[in-house]
Image: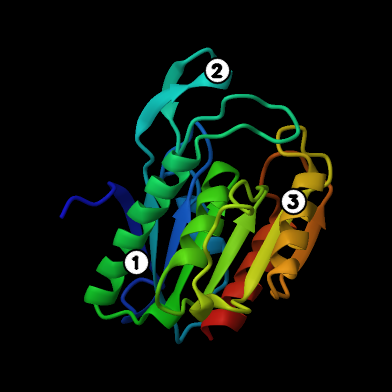
Amino acid sequence: MQYLPAVELEWPQGRVVTASVIWLHGLGADGNDFAPIVPQLNLPAGVGVRFIFPHAPSIPVTINNGYVMPAWYDIKSLDGDRHVDTEQIERSASWVHDLINREIERGVPAERIIVAGFSQGGAISYQAALTYPQRLAGMMLLSTYFPTAETVVMNDVQAKLPALICHGSLDPVVVESMGLDGKAKLEALGFEPEYKSYPMEHAVCPQEIVDIGDWFSRVLG
């Protein structure tokens, strides 16, 4: 089977892998974007985690005048509803499912796998985590929104899945109200997501990295 190309990093180095995090980048970036954060997460010494940072394929993006760039799906407009290509979101989510299946084949149980993403990658994480047919460990949603909230067919095994949502209060790209809307839509599905806001733009800040590490430790510890 063909899998998405990805950067892989096992941390702490030399530790037996007992958990995995599949972490998706945002529009125009690639899998190298978040790899430098891993050593800063202060993960528990007894937990070996394989981090997988996939590269999105390059496709034309309408809002950027059709310019070809790494993207998980096309964005057709930047109005309040963010007209997006839902079929591409579902396809990208299926690629994430393939990566989850590979981790299971490598010996990591589904309930020890986190799906995470930033911006566009977070939108895919919503879709991929909620529709996967085996219970996962959790989903992490950074500076993102939930574009398939009205169409997603959630698998019941993911009910009340641990979720961490982080957003910048000064974000001009994905405004914080979109992150809060994702939180509200998860709550309407019966979830109890943790929500954290930071005085930052469309980025990741030091306190957020600390909070992400704490959440990983709780979910995987």
The reply to whether callout 1 and callout 2 are in contact (CB within 8 Å) is: no
Residue at which label 2 appears:
64
Camera-nearest residue between 30 and 103:
103
| Local crowd size for mark 3, using a 10 Å CA cut-off: few (<14), some (14–19), many (≥20) | many
Relative side of 90 to 104, left or right: right
**Is residue 63 positioned above or below 172 on the image?**
above
Between marks 3 and 1, how big is the CA–CA gap? Answer: 25 Å
Q: Earlier in the sequence, mark 1 or mark 2?
A: 2
Any mark on residue 100, and which?
A: 1
Amino acid type at mark 2: Asn
Extreme residue toward the left, this view:
1
- Other-residue count near label 1 (Cα within 10 Å), few / some / many at <14 / 14–19 / ≥20: many
The disc label shown at residue 220, or none = none
Secondary structure, mark 1, is helix
Residue 148: horizontal and vertical position, in percent?
Answer: 58, 50
Q: Is residue 168 visible?
A: yes
Q: Amino acid at mark 1?
A: Ile
- SS class, disc 2: helix
Name above or below for residue 201 compared with residue 109: above
Spatial distance from mark 3 to mark 2, Cα to Cα? 23 Å
Image position of 171 with respect to 4: above or below: above
Give the x, y percent position of residue 50.
37, 68
Which sits earlier in the primary sequence, circle 3 or circle 1?
Answer: 1
**Residue at the (26%, 80%) spot, across then down:** 107
Looking at the image, do the residues carrying marks 3 and 2 touch, with CB atoms under 8 Å apart?
no
Circle 2 packing at 10 Å, graded few (<14), some (14-19), many (20+), is few
Which residue shows up at 34% across the image and 79% down it? Answer: 15
Can you identify the residue that label 3 sits on? 179
- Quarter of the image for residue 59 reads top left
- On screen, residue 106 versus residue 218, left or right, reads left
- Residue 79 % position (x, y): 73, 28
